[in-house]
Amino acid sequence: MAEHADEIEPRGDSFMDKIQRDDSSSSDSDSEKKKHDGELKKKHHDASSPPTSSMKSKIYRLFGREKPVHKVFGGGKPADVFLWRNKKISASVLGGATAVWVFFELLEYHLLTLVCHVLILAFAVLFLWSNASKFINKSPPRIPEVRIPEDQYFQIAAGLRNEMNRALDSIRNIASGRDLKKFLVVVFGLWVLSIVGSWCNFLTLFYISFVLLHTIPVLYEKYENQIDAFAEKAMIEIKKQYAVFDAKVVSKIPRGPLKEKKKA
């Protein structure tokens, strides 16, 4: 009986081992099935939804802009002032410009007279303060020494020279008749500017431009997507109208061959 029991025992162990192996194999197959289903769902989701990078590259930006508005304005303190990053500084700058416009336009104050009166007042205050400090036992005013750095001066001069050369090259290209579209845009812009100049003087025009520079960029940054979508539709319509104008008018204008001289 003992030997018979010993023979049954290993059979029982092998049967239990078989059950465990079956359970483990079934769990492995279930996990593989779930993993396979997850991969199929992921592939289907990737195929149905386009990548965000390609979508972002297709978004139209006004004037072909690729950088944020803050970077377009230089990304420094002037950009912070124009985009109202610091409301106190921006409001102070706009208030100062408004005060200058009121002085010269509404009160009819002249620039040379204002500068002379301000300098007279400043010199008088500093002179009296420096002499009165000996009698009232107070320190005299500290007048800072202002020096223009040579390197910075040359950098500014080089930057202005490059911009002037670029502007002269653009004027030369427009006047040479190579780009009719750019020529028409420049002529139309100058014509509009001449009309606006007949309505107001240069100071008022400068002040209006200054106010627009402090309002339009911050509004554009706030409603960027809506403005870009509207500008895209407008540009498509303008291109259609220009194509019609080019086919009916510009293409019928006789042109002579342009001969460019090659430099030796």
Image (cartoon, rainbow, N blue to C red):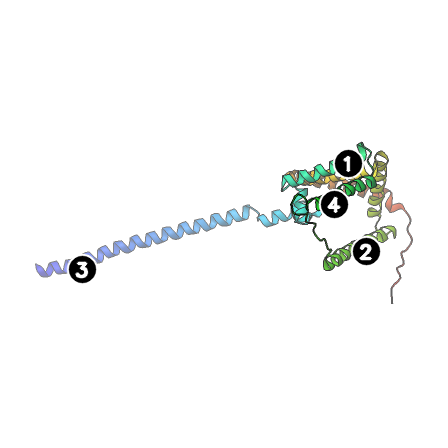
| 178 lies left or right of 8 | right
Q: CA distance from mark 4 to mark 1?
A: 30 Å
Label 2 secondary element: helix
Visible in this render: residue 88? yes
Label 4 secondary element: helix
In front of the other: label 4 or label 3? 4
Q: Give the crowd class for mark 4: few <14, some 14-19, many >=20 residues within 10 Å.
A: few
Kindly check if marks 4 and 1 are in contact, taking CB atoms under 8 A apart as contact. no
In front of the other: label 4 or label 1? 4
Residue 10: image tag: 3
Q: Amino acid at mark 1?
A: Trp
In front of the other: label 3 or label 2? 2
Residue identified by numbered label 4: 127
**Picture coordinates of residue 109 (x, y %)?**
82, 35
| 81 lies left or right of 245 | left
Residue identified by numbered label 2: 165
The residue positioned 75% from the left and 55% from the top of the image is 156
Kindly check if marks 3 and 2 are in contact, taking CB atoms under 8 A apart as contact. no
Q: CA distance from mark 4 to mark 3?
A: 116 Å
Q: Is residue 43 above or below residue 102?
A: below
Q: Amino acid at mark 2?
A: Asn
Kindly check if marks 3 and 1 are in contact, taking CB atoms under 8 A apart as contact. no
**Picture coordinates of residue 198 (x, y %)?**
86, 35
Q: Amino acid at mark 4?
A: Phe
Q: CA distance from mark 3 to mark 1?
A: 106 Å
Of the numbered discs 3 and 2, the one sitting upstream in the chain is 3
Q: Residue furthest front?
A: 135
Query: Which quadrant would the C terminus be assigned to in this image?
Result: bottom right
In front of the other: label 3 or label 1? 1
Q: Give the crowd class for mark 1: few <14, some 14-19, many >=20 residues within 10 Å.
A: some
Q: CA distance from mark 3 to mark 2?
A: 99 Å
Residue identified by numbered label 1: 101
